[in-house]
Image (tube, rainbow, N blue to C red):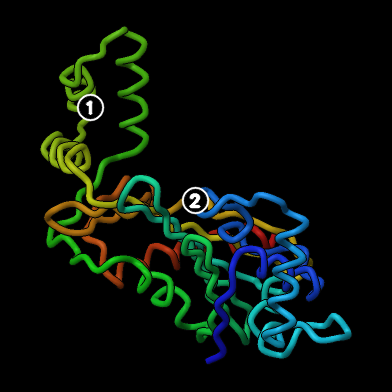
Amino acid sequence: MPKLDVDRLEYMILAGWAGISRVPTVASYANYGTPVQDLNEELEAADARCRQRGLVGRDNSVNDVVWDLMGVYPVGSLEFDLRFSRQKGTELRACVTQSAKSATRTVVNGDRIILEKVRPGDAIPALASLLPEHPPLKMQPLQIDLAELRAARAQVAKNGDTDERALEDALRSRGVNIAEYRKATRMLDGPKLGVGEIGVTVWSPTRKEIRGEQTLRIIDLEQGRVAVYNSRSQRMVAGCDMGTYRRVLGDIATAAQREVAW
């Protein structure tokens, strides 16, 4: 599978010469990494490096490998994007952009951007495999009714109560399973080893863009990795394994595809 490792400015140069105006959001900004001192000067140096590597020809066109990797950006129909951080000052950002016949994984790691072809059917595992190794938490899924939770919070706020017990009383009066609520709250309020999120974007054939309404939150606890997501009217907390990634992200993508088709 074709693969390319470039720095942030080389990536900008290649996208420019390829005539690509839209690159993945995860690769279009830099929260961390080496600050640019003189943009014009450093862009000229990046352009020279690209030419030395044969990535850009004398006619200013990018080579076949670059186009094979970046060419999916303007025609992609589905994109899964990941942001994950395990310690302050660092962030893993990545996405897989796919069309019917092609998919490219884009990984931002500090000053480097790595592009690699993956099979379209492997988009979700190709993204999840980038996460630090951590076992899924073995647990029975917990669920909380979202409508009742919102209503209980509104009731507590209206009464001016700030005590957690007031919220629990409001939930109990609405028939919510307090044991599950307490277990989920205590679990998610505890120490975290890492936190991240995966979102979904889809495009119609006319390039209408829709962002999935939901995301999949990933939380690494000492006991294992958990997923937090919404399923219909329920807030779910469950062990996060490959089946969870496929099911939840597949549902988010399907809902967005239905919306973009209207």
Q: Earlier in the sequence, mark 1 or mark 2?
A: 2
Q: How crowded is mark 2: few (under 14 residues within 10 Å), some or many (20 or more)?
A: few
Give me the C-alpha separation between circle 1 and circle 2. Answer: 42 Å
What amino acid does circle 1 point to?
Leu
Query: SS for tag 2?
Result: loop
Residue 171 disc label: 1
At 74% from the left and 81% from the top, the residue drawn is 51
**Quadrant showing the C terminus:** bottom right
Query: SS for tag 1?
Result: helix
Q: How crowded is mark 1: few (under 14 residues within 10 Å), some or many (20 or more)?
A: many
Q: Please, is residue 132 above or below residue 116 in the view?
A: above
Residue 244 locus on image (x, y percent): 31, 66
Residue placed under numbered mark 2 in the picture: 32
Residue 107 locus on image (x, y percent): 50, 69
Q: How many marks?
A: 2
Q: In which quarter of the image is residue 122?
A: bottom left
Q: Please, is residue 111 above or below residue 90 in the view?
A: below
Q: Quadrant of residue 127?
A: bottom left
At 42% from the left and 54% from the top, the residue drawn is 91
What amino acid does circle 2 point to?
Tyr
